[in-house]
């Protein structure tokens, strides 16, 4: 199987050009290639397929082999791949990608013939719980705001009394290290052991299909820091749909403004999110990076 390893601010996937070849058992392939010791190492597998309604289709699989609905960082990488590898004309600056969450439109910033950055129209958010809802998990009770960006998110703001409830999982040393490039080089979030309580949120019976959970610290107006526990993958360096959900929840909670460029700092880098009043759509801007290509045999 020929593949290309790519990432969007550290959220890495193995990409396969299915215009040229077919993957017969993608669930099994996803589990194998995602293994960071015995495979390639990634947060999952993304197949770039032909589409009858868009420039291409994105089929996403998590590292446990489960099917993913949508990945914001992944769709940016798909956009970069199809442009850089000539699957769309070189004069195109806007492309469309079919996903299980609908067709996404991407505006490309091209330098020296390669895509450097992309802005994705992520569509309208679905507000599941505009007023914070209480959730009992991992022995604590915390408020969260439920947002869907084509996949479910529970956004938890670690402010005031809520932050104190996470004290048992604070470590003396950092459990996560942030990449440079963001305004925030460190955060109180970085000493939390997400692996100790993340699964309790992901698998809570409040979420029959499991959920992604974002833990957020407010640094200032329109400036947020987050870590994410993704369903099916655990903690990842970044989550594009999660950053969008966090920005929407922050507007609802009064920490950010609609129509503003909201800076969201993740472990792998930074994304800019804007929730537009004009069409109620959420727009995500960030980079996409190709790491290497190769060929691997799936046993």
Image: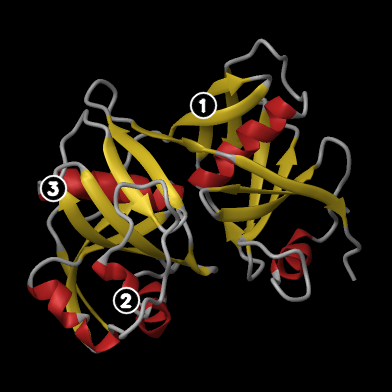
**First in sequence: mark 2 or mark 3?**
2
> Which residue occupies the extreme top position in the image?
91
Which element carries disc 2, helix, strand or loop? Answer: helix
Q: Quadrant of residue 212?
A: bottom left
Neighbourhood count class around disc 3 (C-alpha, 10 Å): few under 14, some 14–19, many 20 upward: some
Distance CA(mark 2)–CA(mark 3): 23 Å
- The one nearer the camera, 143 or 90, is 90
Q: Quadrant of residue 108?
A: top right
In the figure, is residue 18 to the left or right of 190? right
Task: Name which residue lies at 16% across and 81% down.
Answer: 165
Task: Name which residue lies at 18% across and 55% down.
Answer: 218
Distance CA(mark 2)–CA(mark 1): 37 Å
Tag of residue 255: 3
As drawn, 184 above or below 93: below
- Nearer to us of marks 2 and 1 is 2
Q: Which residue is mark 2?
A: 191
**First in sequence: mark 2 or mark 1?**
1
Instruction: Say whether residue 54 is visible.
Output: no
Quadrant (top left/top right/bottom left/bottom right) for the N terminus: bottom right
**First in sequence: mark 1 or mark 3?**
1
């Amino acid at each position: 199987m020929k593949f290309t390893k790519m990432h969007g601010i550290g959220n890495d996937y193995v990409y396969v050009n299915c215009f040229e070849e077919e993957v017969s058992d993608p669930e099994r392939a996803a589990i194998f290639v995602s293994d960071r010791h015995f495979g390639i190492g990634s947060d999952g597998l993304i197949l770039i397929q032909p589409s009858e309604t868009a420039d291409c289709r994105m089929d996403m699989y998590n590292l446990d082999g489960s099917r993913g609905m949508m990945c914001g960082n992944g769709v940016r990488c798909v956009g970069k791949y199809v442009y850089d590898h000539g699957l769309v004309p070189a004069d195109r600056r806007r492309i469309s990608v079919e996903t299980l969450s609908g067709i996404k439109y991407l505006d490309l910033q091209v330098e020296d013939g390669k895509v450097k950055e992309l802005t994705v129209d992520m569509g309208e958010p679905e507000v599941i719980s505009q007023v914070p809802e209480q959730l009992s998990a991992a022995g604590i009770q915390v408020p969260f705001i439920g947002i869907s960006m084509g996949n479910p998110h529970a956004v938890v703001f670690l402010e005031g009394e809520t932050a104190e409830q996470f004290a048992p999982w604070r470590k003396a040393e950092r459990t996560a290290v942030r990449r440079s490039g963001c305004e925030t080089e460190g955060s109180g979030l970085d000493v939390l052991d997400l692996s100790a309580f993340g699964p309790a949120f992901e698998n809570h019976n409040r979420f029959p299909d499991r959920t992604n959970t974002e833990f957020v610290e407010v640094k200032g107006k329109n400036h947020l820091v987050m870590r994410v526990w993704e369903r099916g993958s655990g903690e990842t360096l970044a989550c594009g749909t999660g950053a969008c959900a966090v920005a929407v929840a922050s507007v609802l909670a009064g920490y950010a403004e609609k129509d503003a460029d909201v800076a969201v700092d993740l472990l792998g880098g930074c994304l800019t999110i804007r929730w537009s009043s004009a069409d109620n759509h959420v727009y995500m801007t960030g980079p996409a990076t190709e790491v290497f290509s190769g060929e691997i045999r799936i046993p």
